[in-house]
Amino acid sequence: MTNKTMMQYFEWYLPENGLHWKRLAAQAEALRKAGINMVWLPPAYKGAAGPASVGYDVYDMYDLGEFDQKGAVRTKYGTKDEYIAAVQALQRNQIAVLCDVVLNHRMGADDTEEVSVVEGLGSNRDQDITGTHQITAWTKFNFPGRAGTYSGFCWNASHFSGTDWDQGAKRNGIFRFNGKYWNRETDVENGNYDYLMGADLDTDNAEVIQETREWGRWYQDTVHMDGFRMDAVKHISFDFCREWIAAMQQHRDAAQNPLFLVGEYWSKEVGRLTHYLDVTQRSLSLFDVPLHFRFLEAATSNGHFDLARIFDHTLTGVDPEHSVTFVDNHDTQPGQALASFIPDWFKPIAYALILLRPVGIPCVFYGDYYGIPHDGIAPVKQLPRLVKIRERYAYGTEHLFFDDGSLIGFTREGDEEHADSGVAVLMTDRCGGKKRLYLGPRLAGRRMVDALGSIPGTVEVGADGWGDFSVNGGSVSVWVTEPAGEYLYLNF
Ligand code: CA
């Protein structure tokens, strides 16, 4: 078994030149050789901003860059054919493909309707601040550019429960459609967080339930992906999501593996995440958002963070089987809605923690691997090597040495299946130091080197399986066997 490593293959500010799918197809083999075996792709359907859309302002989910809508045939990333070719190139390289699914909202409607609404308070959506009145809402989606191809379904106000823009008065608000209610089974932030943006899907509506399933089946039959990344799940009825996932799994052939699903539930509170997993019967994993914020706190506390508790109150800490770990993503990068970018110096430490331990499935951010030219952000230079160490050497029993507030370590004993495997990892958020770490009997007598190259020389593991390792200030050292170090030095 090879460790699973996901890459989020996009960042917010990719060029709007339509070349992304082509680049991905050309890179598929290089990604496999780098140690990536799962890739999460951005939303592939036409957004309201057309070829400038990152994809979350969903307009037409049947338009994967095939119809002249919103200013172009292609999306920001390319055409439908290029998309499917990229997916196939990845799968030929044994890389599983996760497609991004946005079921919460729609934007860029073709026409308006007069709708009777009640306005609610932004900070408490359950509190009405007006009586019933009419607004002009963008809720009619007829997709004239697609003209019924694949599906004749058209959306109107009856399929939505609210919106945030009155075209008549030209003003923003939280407008709940009269006779509709925000869904109870969503997040409790802002009183009730069913509403996020755009025209909010009414997931109690039978036509909405049927249409989202039909689309999902069409999408599977068209793209043959291996799984989904579910956007904004805390804003969508938990029951609706669980049932949608069940319908998608049902559509798989018996011969296929089940779909792998990971949801974005953006909350620092691990209790909200585990509640979601309970309600959805663990039919999907979640991104470990609390861990991202532990990293941010550790990186911005001037060495006063207790590193021994870095995994406390995280999803990886309480339910590693359903945790997808990450350091940053397209929302946390500078300039974005949830901007909380992990500072440079801490990135290698954070990546060592998610890539080299046996808990969770790590997701490497494109912007960290390749850099973010838009903001002058360089790639994390240790990252390709850390991903490779995960693929080849981070195996076997784990020993944790989380016994100090500023100098912690962990080891993997290695196993018989992976030649020269076994690692010892040491990290600090303060001054450099030394620590005795136990690697087990397999590596007794072996010499280890720091694969990240900051500590010169070798450390010999004693006959008792223990070794004395060191690390420089504010950094991480990753010790591998000598032949492993030589391989990495020559190839990465
Ligand atoms: Ca919603």
Image (spheres, helix red, strand yellow):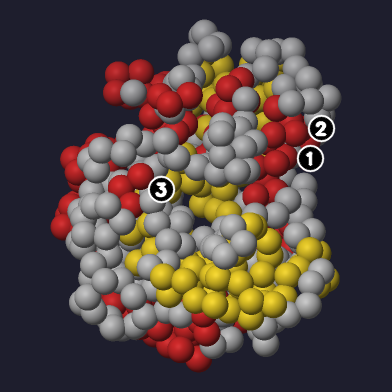
Residue named by callout 2:
306
Task: Please say if the residues under marks 1 and 2 sit with CB atoms less than 8 Å apart.
Answer: yes
Q: Which residue is mark 1?
A: 309
Which mark lies nearer to you, 3 or 2?
3
The extreme front residue here reads 168
Label 2: how many Cα within 10 Å (few below 14, some 14–19, many 20+)? some
Q: Residue at x 74, y 12 (%)?
A: 431
Real-space CA distance between mark 1 and mark 2, rounded to the nearest whole angstrom = 6 Å
134 and 444: which is toward the camera? 134
- Residue 228 or residue 354, whichever sits in front: 228
Choose top left, top right, bottom left or bottom right for residue 322: bottom right
Q: Which residue is mark 3?
A: 54
Q: Earlier in the sequence, mark 3 or mark 2?
A: 3
- Left or right: 206 in relation to 269: left
Q: Where residue 77 appears, x then y in whole percent?
A: 28, 47
The residue lying at 57 percent from left, 28 percent from top is 347
